[in-house]
Image (cartoon, helix red, strand yellow):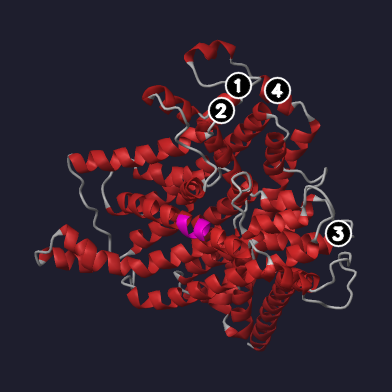
Amino acid sequence: MTAVSGSRPAASVERWDARNIAQALLFVVLLLLIAGPLLILVVTSIQPRAAAPLLWGAPTLEHYRDVALRPGTAQLIWNTLAYAGGSVVVAVIIAVVIAFLTERTDMPGRTTVRVLMYSWMAVPALVFGYGWILLINPGRGVLNVALRSVFGLERAPLTPYCMAALIIIAGLSLVPTAYVMLSGLLRNMDPTLEDAAYVSGASRAAIAARITAPLLAPGILSVGIFLGMAMVQSFDLPMIIGLTARIPVLSTRIYTAASPDSGIPNYGLASAFGVCLLVLAMGLMVLYARVTRSSERFRTVTGKGFRPRRIQLKGLQRVMAVGGVVLYFAIMLAPLLILLWASLFPFYRLPAWSELGNVSLDAYRSVLSQPQALRALGNTVLLFLTSATIVVVMACLVSWFAVRGGGTMGRLLDMMSFAPMAIPPVVMAIALLLIFLRTPLHGTIWVLVVGHMTIYLAFAARTMNAALVQIHKELEDAAHVSGASWATGLRRILFPMVWPQIINTWLWVVAHSARDLTFPLLLLTSTNVVAASAIYLRWDFPDLPGAAALSMIVVGGLMLLVIPIQLYVTRRIDGDQ
């Protein structure tokens, strides 16, 4: 008895020390990832105009005065808000309709829609944007040529180079992300109140207007604000479409200041604009936190003892539902199809049956025979595998300490993990550029890994928080009482129970890391080029067939990775229910 009683405290101390060490390491890593770059950014923004990066002189506010007194600053802010707000409205409206059809009705093909929605996030935004440029370019855009031919128009009716087109294209590309976030709201909403109203004689329209909509409104609003933060910070589409259309936003203004076409970079001005964008994003994050807290009052799910009732679609309703979803996917597929067509010819040709005899794979052979393209593809694989794996491991640990560990350190880690939501990627990229400019890491793929680790941790940690909250801690307590260590409890008990969320989070980071253009373009060198920056450079060269072929290789590779895993996860989850 003496030996047993003496061994128990030692084991407890060992487990406590392991947790403390893990907490301390996480705290240091998060501090370096978040506080360090922000400090460098703020300090650079108050340095004199002629000061070299990290060679600090007397502080000055000249860059902020420049930002405030520039004639186009107000228009810049308006463009940013209009672009972000408009695209979110488009995305949320479409996503709510499709999520309702897949989660609350008996529409056929629901599993296929879910898998396609999640998989579509792997399509890079710049690929989607380039496809739309080929479709509605005023010169030889496919749709414009068709409309002029059919209706005898003298001028092209469509153009991608306006604010409305930019908003619609961005909104369509955002729908899959909005769907993934909104489908859970509809899937987990207890239908008891709706059923009670229906039994009382209320019509479906009245139930939707007076019960369903008010219950969903806080959740939809919080998702909208979250997406608004992302779009305020977005860079890809404003870069490839907005600059040509002369519609600058804050993210592209930061890029042009740090990477001008001519002259030396103005890192001080770029940092000042970055701080302004950071303040705007932080304001949206505070609003998001308040809306999320208020939405707790609208929860109707208190356990798992319910099964949502599906609305039966009949006749015309079913046809319209399926037709609407098919139309959406057809619209999303059109840009990829035109890029596929462009990749099959040495020069761009309008789609026509007569051209099929001239199809060749020369562009693909050319791309795959070039060392730079192969390096870009290899760097892309290394980037998304490394960053996604590290992010998921960190998110699991941070979420455990936040949900299970409690205490001041747990709350602090939770707050620090969410802080990157307020850091626009273009701001973080500028900060990392300044930090690593005179170090051996400058120009390497590992700087991109650090950037993606920081930016994507917030989403991963929030996803894992939601998963861990649903698992009662008594299972881990039982393992600890049986003598299992803290790490063994996580590895053998807890994480196997939330493996679908872990895999989905990993896939989400993989997709967004592979499609990101912000870090690869701002930190671009000849050695750290990845697929997104290589596509951009080929399009800008211009090498349309090469850019289109590389785009198809990237999209096809990501789909081959994402779709099988998503099908496996979906079938396993459906089989466990």
Q: Which of the marked residues, 3 or 1, is nearer the chain's N terminus? A: 1
Asked if the residue at tag 4 contacts the one at tag 1, i.e. Cβ–Cβ closer than 8 Å, the answer is no
Q: Quadrant of the C terminus?
A: bottom left
Q: Which residue is mark 4?
A: 365
Q: Position of residue 97 (x, y in %)?
A: 33, 52
- The circle on residue 437 is 3
Q: Give the extent of the magenta segment.
A: 82-86
Q: Which residue is mark 2?
A: 340
Could you tell me how far apart the alpha carbons at marks 1 and 4 are, in whole angstroms?
A: 11 Å
In terms of image quadrants, where is residue 67? bottom right
Residue type, numbered disc 1: Leu
Instruction: Please state if 314 lies on the left or on the right of 440 as rendered.
Output: left
Residue 394: mark: none
Dot 1 corresponds to which residue?
344
The residue under label 4 is which amino acid type? Arg
Residue placed at 87% from the left, 68% from the top? 54
- Where residue 50 sits: x, y (%)? 88, 66
Instruction: Look at label 3 and name its amino acid.
Output: Leu
